[in-house]
Image: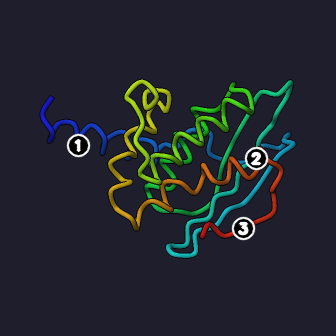
């Protein structure tokens, strides 16, 4: 596949998640929640999560944000639903390593599903916080740091 076609595919996946976000809304039955905020661009994501038997049974997000933050939140919620807390934290760590420019092999990247397309976004420093905001919120909620915080 040519580089131009690959970029078009990545753009289509990101736009699809941003325009028709999966798991958008707020759960009424949840036992974990957090709100995270990116002051550099105004993105704000609120996560509600229902965990039962150490698994993420339901997860939803809402808030305001750019295309990248909304798409990333959609991809993240889709990916971790049904996963154990430990699995979700491992996926979040893998994603964070990409943002920190740590190399990862192709097999590990495939674990991220649609979210692996955000690797290209990580090349733009100003967009890293947008792409990682929801993932940072997931870590905070799962690790019990649930009050609203800014993503510095």
Instruction: Pick whichever, 61 or 113, lies toward us.
Output: 113
Rendering coords of residue 33 (x, y %): 79, 51
Rendering coords of residue 105 (x, y %): 39, 30
Q: Helix or strand or loop: what does disc 2 sit on?
A: strand
Label whose residue precedes the other's in the sequence (2 or 3) = 2
Q: Relative to 81, is 120 on the left or the right?
A: left
Label 2 crowding class (10 Å Cα cut-off): few <14, some 14-19, many 20+? Answer: many
Rendering coords of residue 52 (x, y %): 85, 28
**Quarter of the figure with residue 23:** top right
Label whose residue precedes the other's in the sequence (3 or 1) = 1
Q: Residue furthest front?
A: 102
Q: Which residue is the site of mark 3?
A: 149
Mark nearest the camera among 3 and 1 is: 3
Q: CA distance from mark 2 to mark 3?
A: 15 Å
Q: Relative to 8, is 100 on the left or the right?
A: right
Q: Which residue is the site of mark 2?
A: 48
In this rendering, is residue 77 above or below 57?
Answer: below
Instruction: Pick whichever, 26 or 56, lies toward us.
Output: 56
Q: Which residue is the site of mark 1?
A: 7
Q: What residue lies at 42% left-to-right and 24% top-to-bottom?
A: 107
Q: CA distance from mark 2 to mark 1?
A: 32 Å
């Amino acid at each position: 596949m040519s580089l131009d076609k690959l970029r078009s595919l990545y753009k289509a996946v990101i736009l699809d998640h941003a325009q028709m976000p999966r798991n958008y809304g707020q759960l009424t039955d949840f036992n974990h929640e957090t709100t995270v905020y990116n002051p550099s661009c105004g993105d704000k994501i609120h996560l509600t999560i229902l965990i039962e038997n150490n698994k993420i049974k339901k997860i939803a997000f809402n808030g305001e944000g750019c295309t990248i933050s909304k798409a990333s939140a959609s991809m993240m919620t889709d990916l971790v639903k049904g996963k154990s807390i430990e699995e979700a934290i491992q996926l979040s760590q893998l994603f964070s390593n990409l943002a920190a420019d740590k190399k990862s092999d192709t097999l590990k990247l495939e674990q991220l599903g649609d979210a692996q397309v955000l690797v290209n976004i990580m090349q733009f420093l100003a967009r890293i916080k947008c792409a990682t905001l929801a993932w940072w919120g997931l870590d905070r909620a799962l690790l019990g740091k649930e009050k609203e915080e800014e993503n510095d």
